Image (cartoon, coloured by chain):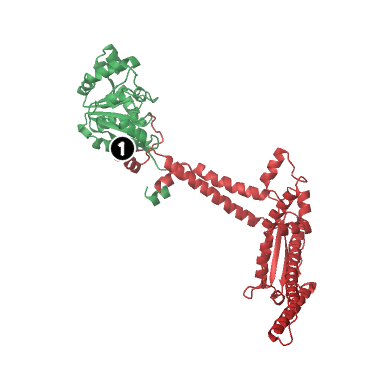
Chain colours: A green, B red
Amino acid sequence: MTAQGERTASLYPELDFRILTACREMSISLGGPDLEALGVTSAGPREGRTTFALGMALVQARDYRRRVILLDLSQGRDGSSLADRLGVGRGPGLAEVVGEGFPLGLVRQSVWDGLALVTAGRFTESLIGPTISAIRGGLLREFREQADVLIADLPPLLGHPLARLIATEFQRLVVVVAAGQTPASKLQEAVSNLPIEPAFVLNGTHSNLPRWLQVLTGG
Amino acid sequence: MQRYLETFFRHRLLLIAPILITLFASLGLTMMHPRMYQASARVWFDSSTISGSTSWNPYTAPADAQAASMTELLQTRTFCRQVGLRGPLASYLKTSAQAFSDPLSKLIAKISGTQPSGTWSDQMLTDQVVATITQGTTVTPVGPQILSVTFSAPNPTVAAGTAQAIVDEFFDETLANRQAEAQSAVDFYQKQLADMPAPAKTDTVAQQRYDDLAQKLDAARLQLAADQQPSASGFRIVDRAQVPDRPVGIRKALLLTGVEGLAIGMTISLLLLMLLTWSDRTIRRPEDFRTLMEQSPVGVIPRTHDRASA
């Protein structure tokens, strides 16, 4: 098995079969093989953005055999970066492209056949301005041109200056909502005034009822 | 309904805790309460003698009528005070002031170092006697003519002495009332006769009135004389209150307080459940999403054991 193959094999334990199945079903609603750019965000941290983005990328790469660039813009803010989960280096990434002029091809880290990861790199506060300019200047479009689909793990919408701006650059935007975590008012605040209509994914649903009661109540 | 059930099972320990706490607290308090002794006296009432009384009602059984009368008297401070002084209750309360107080008051007294025993004023003692008699006495007709008077106390002698004192005081009170009533009638008719001039022999109407009054005066005097006879009181004690040799069973008290504790705990839990459900504005199910966001989610990911953190 090649190094890439080993990494790919190690991907699957990362994602539960049920998560992958759910991502497959949602992938169809989100455009399936016609999807070009998908931004994945949430209202707050630790709602399951990274997992969902990874699941969608795997479905696009494996099921549709498409070339996928998985862009990690959450910068490991939730303590779990895609680079760590996929076992690749944290850089160079977007920060190096914006700050040091790295070519795009150099920051793409191949994870599996058709699936490449672009990390946030060594991102600092001083890079926020240039990043905004680069995105407005078509940086994301350049990424898209190098693959069939671009899937980005975005920062949370609340409390991050880049989040709203980047979110508007995507064809489809998915807001992941962790079940029983984010109050509805926070979620409404997060998605208010977004220029595009986001789709919502409810993550981590479960019932506390005993199975017999679930059967009785039809839950 | 589903939301309430979900909330209950999500916080089941928190919601079950008030039920268990109030249940065990009520049972514990009952166990800590001093064991009670019960003594009963049974009295027989003669309807023919009582029928002479002005308060007699032919449609009520004598025992029922006397039960109502005794219950009324037991609501009065004077009667209760007399019972307390007549029986052993007042002196018992004086010497063991805390015997009837609840465990919580005892604990507070212990912590604060105060000993209410021997420090009660007459007023406080009367209050305590009234409260004890009111709470501890049960008056029940056991038949049309027999009335049972039961008193509960933590001391068997006090229980028996007080039950007997209630009956004795009731007898005295009833007889005194009856005698006072008869005496009033005698006094009234005597005054009427004294104020009436001797009627002329030819004035038959006046003569008739005079004779009527004289007759009524005789009847009132007869009634007074009868009421002053101890044997003609119209009631007698069938069973004197005996000193009980064992306390009453605690099972019934435990059952009652247990049910009360459960009811209180369940009310608290129910309120807590409603509060928790109403205060939870997070989205947990697709249905909540539709209600709160007026939009359906594009998909649902079930929770897995290795739930991703980000």
User: Mark 1 — residue?
Assistant: A22
Q: Nearer the viewer, residue B248 or A2?
A: B248
Q: Nearer the viewer, residue B109 or B258?
A: B109
- Relative to residue B291, is residue B265 drawn left or right? right
Quadrant of res B146: bottom right
Q: Quadrant of the C terminus of chain B?
A: top left
**From where the camera sits, is residue B37 visible?**
no
Q: Residue at x 73, y 38 (%)?
A: B113
Q: Residues within 10 Å of mark 1 (few under 14, many from 20)?
A: some
Q: Horizontal and vertical percent for residue B162?
A: 75, 59
- Relative to residue B153, is residue A186 drawn left or right? left
Subunit of mark 1?
A: A
Q: Secondary structure at mark 1?
A: helix
Q: Amino acid at mark 1?
A: Ala
Quadrant of res B7: top left
Q: Residue at x 30, y 41 (%)?
A: B294
Q: Horizontal and vertical percent for residue B261?
A: 58, 50
- Placement of B72 over or under A42, stated as above or below: below
Q: Residue at x 75, y 42 (%)?
A: B115
